[in-house]
Amino acid sequence: MNYLAERINWINESQTIGMAKAGRELKAKGFDVINLSFGEPDFNTPDHIRKAAKQAIDDGYTFYTPVPGYPELREAIVDKFSRENNLDFSINQIVVSTGAKHSIMNVIMACVNPGEEVIIPTPYWVSYSEMVKLVGGVPVFVNAGVDTEFKISPEQLEAAITPKTKAFLFSSPCNPTGSVYTKEELAGLARVFERHPEVLVLSDEIYEYINFAGKHESIAQFEAIQDRVVVINGVSKGFAMTGWRIGYIAAPLEIAQACEKLQGQFTSGACSIAQRAALSALTSPRNSALEMRDAFLRRRDMVLELVKEIPGWICNVPQGAFYIFPDVSSYFGKSHEGKVIENATDLCMYILSKAYVSLVPGEAFGAPECIRISYAASDEVLKDAMNRIKTVLADLK
């Protein structure tokens, strides 16, 4: 007897989670595994944020929260957008959810009908396509390679829009590539959307504070399309608060109200203590976020230097997030002890089994010629991992 709904077969397991799971299984057997597969800062949540959470417990913030979030947190988000991004929203346009992933899923469920298309530039974050498929939507991929810094052009965007297009979903800074769209590049995309007022724009800006290119630029800044841009953000990456699970959207009022309606039937309001911690994060000086950004920049440069020692890897210089995304296709077809490397998944499994370093294959992100390496780890761990990788790759002939 099959008790499962068909929709569970429409989606794939997250390969980032899958690779981390494989790494944990090896570690449980006693192997010294280095996990560079997770998109998680390795820093502790700053002290003042943790103190705010402890104070919230003492102050009795232990009851159900309003579905869209505490009013004071939503007001702080409004102030953040005004102060840092020059974007004007009302408190009623803000919905706080259990992480940015939850926020994105809310928007997709609220807006995408079965059969409607959602344009997704590739490489893309692993869950985008699966979220679209889960509601019966159709992901439409627009490919960009390392030669264009993994960023699509306005011409590619225009060519992808059809009468069935409902939305465009992307991230900048990008997971998995670390690419950052400039203001001029975003303006080019915005001009295309001006010609297509039926297309909703979903802008995932969760890596906003991990930006090495200067001021963060949001596609929501362009007045001609502001009324149909949904900005998704949260506290997980910039404040090292992944486990606190707080994300949020700023959206046109109708969409915000729809997401609140959905959330009221699924999860209700996000955790009370985590919301008070997020309030502290958003209303305090950004010193800790800046320190983390600087550390990630130093690590990026170190890892890129180590990559130069690996023959055949092609890597750009990412301008944000904490990943490198090298093209490793020169190793396809090589073998070791009778095992042929057919694709990036094979290469990642080879590296895991021989070097005990967990990475994520590019197939998960729509780029089968690449692998994702997170440099959210200490300098010593990163040096060890890259040396292990270089050593086992030299055995492939």
Image (cartoon, rainbow, N blue to C red):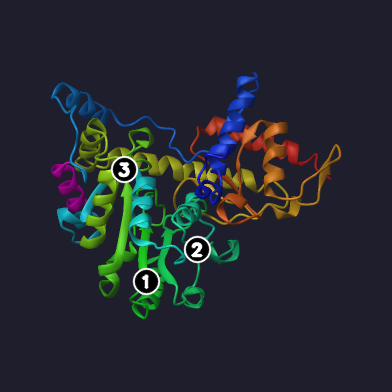
Q: Is residue 130 left or right of residue 192?
A: right
Magenta stretch containing residue 369, yes or no? Answer: no
Can you give x and y, in whole percent of width and height, for residue 70 in the image?
A: 17, 41
Evaluate if marks 1 and 3 touch, with contact meaning CB atoms under 8 Å apart: no
Classify 229 as above or below 79.
below
Name of the residue lying farthest toward the right: 338
| Secondary structure of the residue carrying numbered label 1 | loop
Question: Which numbered disc flags the more N-terminal residue, 1 or 3?
Answer: 1
Can you give x and y, in whole percent of width and height, for residue 106 in the image?
A: 34, 51
Residue with the mark numbered 1: 199
Give the main secondary structure of the magenta stretch.
helix
Can you give x and y, in whole percent of width and height, for residue 159 in the image?
A: 51, 77
3D distance between C-alphas at marks 1 and 2: 14 Å
Question: Which numbered disc flags the more N-terminal residue, 1 or 2?
Answer: 2
| Secondary structure of the residue carrying numbered label 2 | strand
Task: Name the residue type under label 3.
Answer: Phe
